[in-house]
Amino acid sequence: MSGLFAALSAGLAWIGAIIDPLCGPAGIFRWFGSGTLLACGDAGWGDEIAYGFLVTASLAVATLPVGLVIGFFVALAKQSEEKSLRLAGNIYTTIFRGLPELLTLFIVYYGLQILVQQFLATVGYEGAVEINAFVAGMIALGVVFSAYCSEVLLSAFKAIPHGQYEAGDALGLHRGKTMRLIILPQLIRIALPGLGNLWMALLKDTALVSVIGLPDILRQTGIAARVTKHAFEFFGIACVLFLVLAMISSVVFSALERSTKRAEAGR
Amino acid sequence: MSIAETMIPPQAPPPSPPKPYTFSRFFGSVALGIWLALGVGIFLTVVNGWDPEKFSRYGPSFLSGLGVTLTLVISSILMGAVLSLPVALGRMSKNRLWGWLAYAYVYFFRGTPLITQLFLIYYGLGSFRPQLETVGLWWFFRDAWNCALFTFTLNTAAYQAEILRGAIESVPRGQREGAAALGLPERVAFFKVILPQAMIVALRPYGNEIILMIKGSAIVAIVTVFDLMGETRRAFSRTFDYQMYIWAAILYLLMVELLRNIWGWLEARLTRHLKR
């Protein structure tokens, strides 16, 4: 079994190396960066920065589903008829929209560390515990994202007329099916522009994770800047890479919006 | 045939049927219970870990950090507001060059993380030290506080320019035409007709921008400016007391909630003529 996983991960790594846009066979740094500070391999910083790019992108992509799912349930709680559920949802959004992302990150990172340590101490394990920075970043950013996401989804829920639910009842669909077949498709269409903005904010917030030591774009370029003393160039590259990510996502989101708009056409 | 001769006296409504115990009620109680337990837990850790000596040593530094944060946010918002005017005008101008320049400025500052911009200016400009010294600007960029203020001003100017542009363009064309039909000069029409309506639209986004700046200002702690977050990190690194982060969280939450409520009141007050 472990051999299968090793083979799978090796295969994935190989595919990743092939399609790597920065240091792959057709990568930008490979073609235009050789001989400069950005060369791939041991000669330059190209491959380190490419790795950081991968980490940033995968952190954002991994955080998105977490945030979306939590945000969806918090939005459901905030529009429920039950008072206590609404109150709990509102406390959640108030706290995580009001705290600075950096502080949330520190609270999650150190707080989890302390919690896990105490838990293991009661079990009988004494020793230093190190929380994975990727996981801590995923939790902190996911929580912040979900707080904003719940607001966007809540206003999208409010934009769906009540007749849609009644139509679901009239068709004899039960509640889960009404939600899945009738409400969700419309919800996605209405919420997509707001979610696009949140995705951009999430992409920018991933840069904060470099502070707790995850080797993302900013940390890798920061190390390169400190070693080579070419700070402006390297941080400029970091900015350009973030801009590239933003451009890619705006292209993707406009394509998504066009494809969800198809259902509306022909009226 | 009988005629009713007495009125039936008014009666109390029948008792409402008992509320069914639903799943959502169960989940609501559980969620509230979790929040309550968290709140009590935090309160107990604060009470148990209360150390007057720590409080007297780090309390004043927290307050000074709060002052630094507020100064940074207020001055960068004000300076950014001034700087956002030409950018917004450029975004709206018909001149291709100005429009393109303003668009590039806004796209850069809105498309990259604030922390990257801060590093670019604080560490990046350090490599241009000889040039800056000849121009005589090195004293300014040598200081982390100045760099933070400079970056934040540039960043918030980009956001505020977009807010301003969106608000001005949201005023219907008819308003401008109406002003022209009344024979108002362009300037008067802009300041007396367009801008007041645009400002009402812009009020809420401006509030959000200030809140974003308060939250974003925490990152200056990384470039050795001792704002609220910086003082917190310093106190934590000396005491390893997790409470420090809780105090900082409470202070940040207080700031943001206070501003949000003030802004809500302000909006209700300023739009009371629109209420029907």
Image (cartoon, coloured by chain):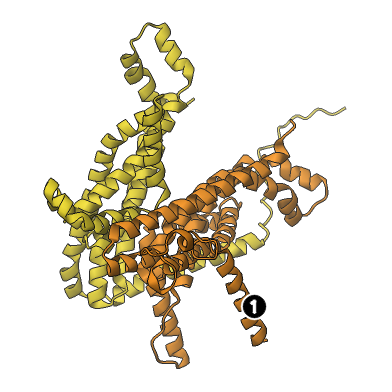
Quadrant (top left/top right/bottom left/bottom right) for the N terminus of chain B: top right
In-front residue for pair B180/B254: B180
- Shade of chain A as shown in the rendered figure: orange
Q: Which residue sits at x=45%, y=84%? A: A119
Is residue A198 depicted above or below B40 in this figure?
above
In-front residue for pair A63/B229: A63
Q: Which residue is mark 1?
A: A8
In-front residue for pair B267/A217: A217
Residue B30 quadrant: bottom right
Q: Which residue sits at x=40%, y=31%? A: B99
Q: Secondary structure at mark 1?
A: helix
Q: In the rendering, at what x and y percent does residue A257 appear?
A: 62, 43
User: Label 1 lies in what chain?
Assistant: A
Is residue B76 depicted above or below A122 in this figure?
above
- Shade of chain B as shown in the rendered figure: yellow
Is residue B165 depicted above or below B116 in this figure?
above
Left or right of B71 on screen, residue A11: right
Residue A151 appears in the figure = no
Amino acid found under the numbered disc labelled 1: Leu
